[in-house]
């Protein structure tokens, strides 16, 4: 009956899962940040698809030439604003630079006149309007003010000339091409640097995939070798692999049903975690007393799934998905072992694994543990800085340093401005500019709101009407012609025609505004969100870390209560090795001066989930369980240990913590739980 | 007879053109051969800007720093300073640096270039005609004249609005 229910459930999960399949989510922030952080995610997205190509040469001119050649080879960049000039021209009586607008508002016509004189007589000024149509060069001044907004990076640094090209792309082929062009255009006298998230992602994924492939091959050979050494029959691997594969499939489909999309990290973590249930099969093949085995196997499943289910309460999408994926996967493997393994007919002879070693002075182990725990815990530091999760290569770090110096982003603040429609957003941006009184760049610089355009027109007419200027430049006829000129029209943002303007928008109702300077601490506006991507993400990570820490404690209490019900006072001996394992792994981080982050707290759940099994099987006094537990510990800790050699810091530090925690827990399970024939060994 | 005269005139003009102008295909080689090595310089400048119905004149000091760029210090009729680092100075700066470095690859992208140098004498002319439609909206053509040491004149022609800017550099020697 149970077998039938399991099969029906499995079929239902597969069918519903197939109807809910989506492309895997790859955005790292969507893995960490909850849905209510959508503005932050989209803003970070906007910036995370930006690639900056920096050209270094003897001077700015040569750097520009280098940039032009590079651009031609790469293909044209669509972020072109020059076409908007025609539209500006037919709206010139509605457009004023911020400076000119402020002077006209204050009726500082003398200054307006002086500026226009400067414009006319300066040989380098860009004249885009005839003095008979625009006697005070207001339109030319507006166009010049925009060209200044466009110049955002320094062009000279430490005696070298620089040019910067911004490209929006996440396409792997484009990034690959950029790396190829970087090689082509770099030599002794000139250099091309690449920066931006897509560059880091590409570089890391290229390196990581090579490393992960090597690790996967070594791990596979290790598991195969160990299994063959113990069972002397590779056929035993067929049901093990089949059960894990089915577990992964059902875990994936169940997650697809419950969540909008499965994150690629969920897939990576969960498949690794489900791989841990190789233990269930090993125990089955190693143990002859199946009734005794299933009591321990059920307790093992309950504690592992229990540890993962608690992750559902962490408000982190990735952990919620991992919780469902892994729990369903583990349950699947458990039922496959329970209902299908008894039909298997595989002949093998077991080769005892555990060497007869003697550890006479157990106190010595406890003393070492105490020293490590005290010194390590004393040195533990927490960090929620997202940048600490990733250490770029020396070359990429140098590129980022140059870009930061050129762009001087240190005092820039991003504001997300919300509005019901585009005009409301533009109005809001303009009132913010006045309120903050700092230099800024926003959509309203390029296309002012209709209200401002109308006000500009009035200000310009007032200027033409002013008595002060009568003797300066305007005759009565000219004045009348200028005031009664009606052929100009208002200008509206046209995102289809000028895709460049889209760079300011994160969705139809939210624009991004970059302010040069700090925002006052008492600033508050319900329609404006101050975004400091790195700081906001770090603050979210801090919240998650605190929540997860509380959940770890709750998980311990719940699991202890369950174990106490099942094993009475022995529950303490079951849970202590996991506690010691976690303490050692965190202390190891302190000793190696690595700060503890959210992912290390996540590792606590994993250590708890994995290592309780070791104690449960040992306390169950199942005759051959020690071999299965050892194989399980060796394969798991060895695989995680290999991960410590990856260059991606997040993965390597997780691998380090897990391998230390799992191995130490196993060691303490040997010390604290002695069953039968082992008494003479330990 | 009349047709013969027209034909002869066209032929002579054509031959003169062939003799005095260097073909576009050999432009890069000949620019590097025929353009002088410009040195850093301090001098006076005079600017005349002609609009459709008016014109303005200004003057001041000009400074060219080799490998860096140009400074214009307007002293008459108003005082203002424009250095090579300011964004509105960029196009004049680029033009002068292109001549100084004999590298027109940046300019060639947006302009058709024509270089001429009479066989006798030290003067030379570079005529740049905008081919990029977006540039044409601002600037129609640029003409640069020079001698064996300096750039002596830059002429900028805008079509819409019709503005002609003429900058002459006056050297003491």
Image: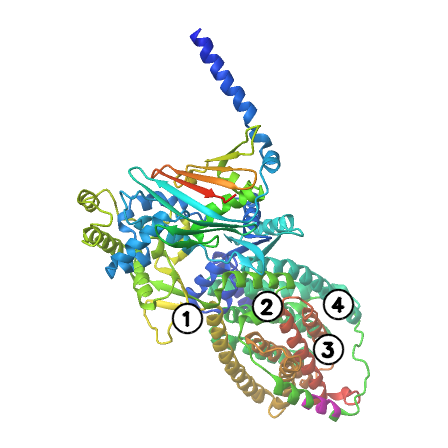
User: Can residue A670 be found in the magenta stretch?
Assistant: no
Chain of the residue under label 1:
A
Q: Are marks 4 and 3 on the same chain?
A: yes
User: Can residue A367 be found in the magenta stretch?
Assistant: yes
Identify the residue under disc 1: A518
Which residue occupies the foreground of this view, B56 or A3? B56
Determine which quarter of the picture holds residue A301. Answer: bottom right
Image coordinates of residue A484 in percent, x first then y, are 18, 44
10 Å crowding of disc 2: few (<14), some (14-19), many (20+): some
Which corner quadrant holds the N terminus of chain A? bottom right
Identify the residue under disc 4: A222
> How far, Cα to Cα, is label 3 from label 2?
33 Å
> How far, Cα to Cα, is label 2 from label 1?
27 Å
Q: Are marks 2 and 1 on the same chain?
A: yes
> How far, Cα to Cα, is label 4 from label 3?
14 Å
Chain of the residue under label 2:
A
Which residue occupies the foreground of this view, A539 or B34? B34
Image coordinates of residue A192 in percent, x first then y, are 60, 53
User: Can see residue A77?
Assistant: no
Left-right relation of A670 to A393 = right
10 Å crowding of disc 1: few (<14), some (14-19), many (20+): few
Identify the residue under disc 3: A630
Instruction: Mark 1 vs mark 3: give the one in front.
Output: 1
10 Å crowding of disc 3: few (<14), some (14-19), many (20+): some
Which residue occupies the foreground of this view, B107 or A434? B107
């Amino acid at each position: 009956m149970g077998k039938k229910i399991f099969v029906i459930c499995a079929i239902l999960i597969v069918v519903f899962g197939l109807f809910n399949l989506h492309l895997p989510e790859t955005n790292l922030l969507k893995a960490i940040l909850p849905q209510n952080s959508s503005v932050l995610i989209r803003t970070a997205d906007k910036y995370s698809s930006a690639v900056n190509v920096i050209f270094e040469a003897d001077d700015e001119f040569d750097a520009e030439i280098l940039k032009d050649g590079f651009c031609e080879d790469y293909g044209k960049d669509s972020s072109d604003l020059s076409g908007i000039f025609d539209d500006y021209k037919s709206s010139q009586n509605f457009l004023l630079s911020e400076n000119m607008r402020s002077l006209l508002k204050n009726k500082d016509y003398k200054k307006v006149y002086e500026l226009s004189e400067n414009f006319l007589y300066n040989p380098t000024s860009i004249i885009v309007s005839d003095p008979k149509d625009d006697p005070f060069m207001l339109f030319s001044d507006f166009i010049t003010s925009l060209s200044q907004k466009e110049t955002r990076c320094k062009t000279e640094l430490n005696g070298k000339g620089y040019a910067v090209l911004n490209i929006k792309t996440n396409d792997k082929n484009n990034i690959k091409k950029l790396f190829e062009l970087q090689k082509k255009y770099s030599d002794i006298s000139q250099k091309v640097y690449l920066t931006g998230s897509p560059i880091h992602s590409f570089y890391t994924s290229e390196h990581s995939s090579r490393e992960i492939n090597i690790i996967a091959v070594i791990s596979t050979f290790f598991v195969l070798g160990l299994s063959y050494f113990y069972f002397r029959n590779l056929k035993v691997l067929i049901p093990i692999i089949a059960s894990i594969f089915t577990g992964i499939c059902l875990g994936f489909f169940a997650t697809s049903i419950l969540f909008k999309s499965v994150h690629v990290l969920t897939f990576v973590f969960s498949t690794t975690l489900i791989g841990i249930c190789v233990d269930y099969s090993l125990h089955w093949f190693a143990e002859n007393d199946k009734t005794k085995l299933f009591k321990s196997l059920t307790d093992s499943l309950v504690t592992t799934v229990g540890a993962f289910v608690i992750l559902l309460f962490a408000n982190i999408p990735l952990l919620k998905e991992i919780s469902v994926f892994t729990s369903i996967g583990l349950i699947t493997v458990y039922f496959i072992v329970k209902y299908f393994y008894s039909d298997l007919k595989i002949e093998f002879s077991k080769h005892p694994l555990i060497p007869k070693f003697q550890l006479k002075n157990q106190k010595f182990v406890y003393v070492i543990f105490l020293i490590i725990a005290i010194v390590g815990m004393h040195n533990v530091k927490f960090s929620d800085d997202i940048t600490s999760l990733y250490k770029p290569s020396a070359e990429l770090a140098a590129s980022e340093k140059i870009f930061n110096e050129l762009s001087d982003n240190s005092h820039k603040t991003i504001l997300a401005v919300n509005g019901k429609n585009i005009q409301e957003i533009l109005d809001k941006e303009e009132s913010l500019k006045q309120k903050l009184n700092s230099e800024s760049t926003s959509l309203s610089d390029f296309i002012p709101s209709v209200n401002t355009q109308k006000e500009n027109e009035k200000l310009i007419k007032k200027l033409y009407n002013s008595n002060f200027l009568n003797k300066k430049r305007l005759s009565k006829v000219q004045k009348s012609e200028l005031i009664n000129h009606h052929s100009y029209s208002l200008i509206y943002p046209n995102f289809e025609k000028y895709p460049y303007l889209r760079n300011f928008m994160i969705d139809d109702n939210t624009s991004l505004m970059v302010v040069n300077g700090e925002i006052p601490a008492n600033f508050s506006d319900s329609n404006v969100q101050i975004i400091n991507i790195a700081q906001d993400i770090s603050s979210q990570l801090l919240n998650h870390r605190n929540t997860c820490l509380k959940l770890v404690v709750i998980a311990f209490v719940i699991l202890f209560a369950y174990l106490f019900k099942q094993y009475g006072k022995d529950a303490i001996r079951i849970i202590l090795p996991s506690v010691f394992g976690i303490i050692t792994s965190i202390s190891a981080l302190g000793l190696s001066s690595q700060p503890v982050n959210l992912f290390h707290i996540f590792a606590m759940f994993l250590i708890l989930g994995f290592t309780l099994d070791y104690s449960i099987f040992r306390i169950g006094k199942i005759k051959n369980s020690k071999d299965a537990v050892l194989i399980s510990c060796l394969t798991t800790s060895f695989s995680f240990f290999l991960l410590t050699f990856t260059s991606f810091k997040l993965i390597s530090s997780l691998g380090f913590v897990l391998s230390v925690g799992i191995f130490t827990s196993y060691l303490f399970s040997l010390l604290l739980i002695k069953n039968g024939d082992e008494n003479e060994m330990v | 007879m009349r047709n013969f005269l027209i034909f002869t005139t066209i032929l002579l003009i054509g031959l003169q053109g062939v003799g005095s102008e260097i073909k576009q295909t050999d432009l890069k080689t000949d620019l590097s051969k025929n353009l002088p090595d410009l040195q850093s310089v301090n001098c006076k400048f005079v600017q005349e800007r002609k609009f459709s119905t008016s014109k303005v004149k200004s003057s001041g000091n000009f400074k060219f720093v080799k490998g860096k760029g140009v400074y214009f210090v307007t002293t008459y009729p108003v005082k203002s300073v424009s250095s090579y680092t300011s964004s509105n100075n960029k196009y004049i700066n680029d033009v002068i640096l292109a001549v100084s470095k004999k590298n027109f690859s940046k300019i060639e992208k947006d302009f058709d270039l024509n270089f001429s140098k009479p066989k006798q004498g030290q003067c030379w002319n570079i005529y740049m005609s905008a081919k990029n439609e977006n540039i044409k909206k601002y600037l129609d053509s640029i003409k640069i004249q020079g001698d064996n040491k300096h750039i002596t004149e830059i002429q900028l022609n805008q079509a819409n609005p019709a503005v002609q800017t003429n900058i002459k550099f006056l050297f003491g020697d």
